[in-house]
Image: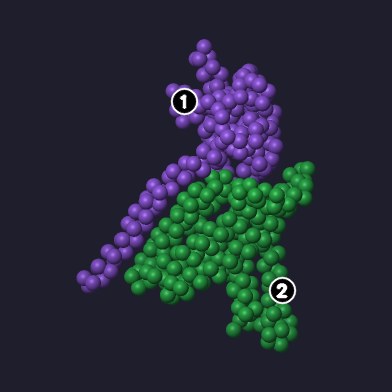
Amino acid sequence: MSTTLTRTFLRDNPALSMMLGLCPLLAVSTTLVAGVVLALCTAGTLVVSGALIGLMRHAIPEEIRLPVFVTVVATTVTVADILLETWSVELHQTLGLFLPLIVTNCVILARAEAVASRQPPRVAALDGAYMGIGFAWVLALLGALRELLTFGTLGRGAEEAFGSAAAHLVLDLGTPADGGLLLAATPAGAFLLLALLIALRNAWQGRWHDAASGAVGRDAPPT
Amino acid sequence: MSSSAWHWQKVLFVPLVAACGLQILGWITANERLQQRQIYEARLVNGMLGRDLSAAPNWERLSALAAYPKVRRIRAAAPDGGSVEVWLGWRAQGGYAGPVDLAIAFDGHARVHQVRLLKHSETPGLGDRVEFRNSDWLLQFLGIGFFEDARLRARQGQIDAISGATITSAAVARGVAGALAAFVQSKGQDR
């Protein structure tokens, strides 16, 4: 069980291992709340579009499968966009451009091509859920780290996202006088933080392989 | 051969069904989305007037000006007892990722009472730091009147730009200057 978990969420993580979907990962991970909400939308899109493509897999001609995939994904994302606007305009405003840009997230197209178009809807949806959660926790962690470095807070904007009851969940460690670390707010800073996370994951995987295969030192070749 | 042709045509139903479905979803949620936008604007105006954010909106809606049909005007009581006119949806061109829609409150002396961003598509973490919930930057505009608006016009004026958000800062400053001029002109027409 733990092997399945680590395999899904750490070893085969779309962001840390496959390096997919880095554009939204770097662009929207400015705060924890923005990251979590975008991750939820992405995960929902992965599940729904995976199931839909799984359902249609026998009807889609091989030659034009990509336009069909993109149409299905774009429709799902537009539905998510409309529903989020129904939920909270303030949140919709915060995510802005990046919600429609989920369409271009390569995790979704990659899973549609690799899994959803070859598997029954149930398997495709489950794969979407695994990938979505794997993507979500990296996005949330990166968002939390960047928010701490930029604003000195954790969970700002929670009130707009989850109602006024969430207002006291915001942790304020005191905003730095000069506006925090500008680098952490920029995509360049996000790249550096992500690189650190990937380095940590690689170090962990080196140990994991050593323990599993008994090999000493470097990464064992993938099997 | 003919069966393969039919195979292709079948796929045309995908965008057709998608378009119809989205249109229907748009109709179903139209009311709810309008309601959410009104709640959002009421909270914004309450914040500008220094009221409790979730207070019931008790203000007078004024008719739109002929010159600016898209700007919604509101007259409300100011915290100091006077009257404030709020312009919602003043469009400032030249933001980093498109126009920036402003909400500006003017006091009885045609000075800027408060400024907020109503709608924009600036980069999260960079351009959106001019927003009131992210910084005190918008407070620089408080109290500026028409005859001091040279402060807004000058490129290196007295409005400090936020580093990393200079284009957004300049667009907002230009937008406030334009709105101020239009407001003074509209008062002149009223008399």
Residue B175 position in % (x across, y down)? 57, 30
Query: Front-most of B16 and A156?
Result: A156
Q: Badge 2: how crowded within 10 Å, few (<14), some, or many (20+)? A: few
Residue B109: image tag: none
Residue B64: image tag: 1
Circle 1: element type: loop
Chain in green (letter)? A
Q: Amino acid at mark 1?
A: Ala
Would residue B45 be found to the left or right of residue A150 on screen?
A: left
| Residue occupying image coordinates x 63% and y 47% | A164
Answer yes or no: is residue A219 visible.
yes
| Residue occupying image coordinates x 67% and y 48% | A167
Chain in purple (letter)? B
The residue beneath circle 2 is A203
Circle 2: element type: helix
Answer yes or no: is residue B171 visible.
no
Task: Kindly identify which chain the residue marked by label 2 belongs to.
Answer: A
| Residue occupying image coordinates x 63% and y 30% | B49
Residue A14 position in % (x across, y down)? 58, 68
Would residue A74 be found to the left or right of residue A150 on screen?
A: left
Q: Badge 1: how crowded within 10 Å, few (<14), some, or many (20+)? A: some
Q: How is the image coloured?
A: by chain
Residue A201 position in % (x across, y down)? 68, 71
Compared to residue B163, the image places residue B7 above or below, namely below
| Residue occupying image coordinates x 60% and y 27% | B105
Task: Kindly identify which chain the residue marked by label 1 belongs to.
Answer: B
Q: The N terminus of chain A lies in which quarter of the figure?
A: bottom right
Do marks 2 and 1 both belong to one polypeptide chain? no
The Cα atoms of the two marked residues, 2 and 1, are separated by 63 Å
Residue at the outermost left position:
B2
